[in-house]
Image (cartoon, helix red, strand yellow):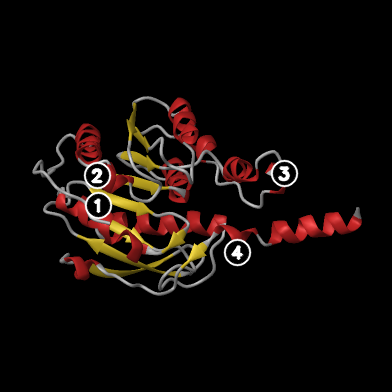
Amino acid sequence: MALVGVGLLILRGCQSQMFYHPDKSLAVTPADVGLAFEPVTLTTSDEVALAAWFVPGDSEQAVLLLCHGNAGNIGNRVGWVKLMNAMGFSVLAFDYRGYGLSGGKPNEVGTYRDAEAAWTYLVEQRGVDPSRIVLVGRSMGGAIATHLATERPAAALILEAAFTSYPDIAQDKAGIFPVRWMAAFDYSTIESLAAVQCPVLIMHSPADTVVGYHHGEALFEAANPPKTFLELTGGHNDAFVRSGDAYTHGIRAFVQAAVPDAVIDASPVAASE
């Protein structure tokens, strides 16, 4: 029994390596897809230097702050950034500690501080009014963006393929074996969401095999109004491409309602992975 207990403690301690999958090399930058951008260094409250990109839109009336998922780095999100920029949005994409060119090692509290540093940069250094900042969280980033929305003001919150909590998603993967009590992280999107007062858009695909559709449904149920649900098509990582116009039209309509005087390009756009 003692050996079992030691084994479980070791498993708990290894969860960082199992959950976070950072890539330190940047294969692509916005310049590689024809986007002008500004490399930015963010400094967190605990003095960690983070790498980020600011991609200006046609107007800075609405700025998207992207919290990405648990694998890769911002270089893997260039296709999404290009799509948002084609719609007229400015985008700030940053890498968590330990990801890409950012310093440090990833941990839950640290990722929350990383998102706060990105918000602070927009407000204090770029002079963006919080009423024009739209927080976007994809997958694990959903928990981080939602936590940020409870700590800092923003115009709106968009969650794509987000899970309800780390223990919930771990239990989904473990099947009948009980693992919730061993969860080393919380990342409770659903708990934070109850405290969010800005408009919320939940986007999820029934075909998502990484984070089940029921997570999106539960998050929508937990969110305070005004809230919108957008059903996507495609998988966990390519729904923004596979969903086509439904994706772009849904985001346009949501942001236009949340930031009424935002200048949003209504021209058709096509996504690429």
In the image, what residue type sits under mark 2? Arg
Q: Which mark is residue 128?
A: 1
Task: Tell me where residue 62 appears, x and y as whole percent.
Answer: 21, 46
Q: Is 2 left or right of 30, judged from the image as shown? A: right
Alpha carbons under labels 4 and 3: distance apart: 18 Å
Which numbered disc, 2 or 3, marks the residue that appears first in the sequence? 2
Which numbered disc, 4 or 3, marks the residue that appears first in the sequence? 4
Alpha carbons under labels 2 and 3: distance apart: 39 Å
Q: Nearer the viewer, mark 2 or mark 3?
A: 3
Q: Are marks 2 and 4 in contact (CB under 8 Å)?
A: no
The residue singled out by tag 3 in the image is: 181
Alpha carbons under labels 1 and 3: distance apart: 41 Å
Q: Secondary structure at mark 2?
A: helix
Which residue is at 25% across, 59% downward?
Answer: 126
The residue singled out by tag 2 in the image is: 132
Q: Secondary structure at mark 1?
A: loop
Q: Are marks 1 and 2 in contact (CB under 8 Å)?
A: yes
The residue singled out by tag 4 in the image is: 17
Task: Tell me where residue 131 appears, x and y as whole percent.
Answer: 27, 41
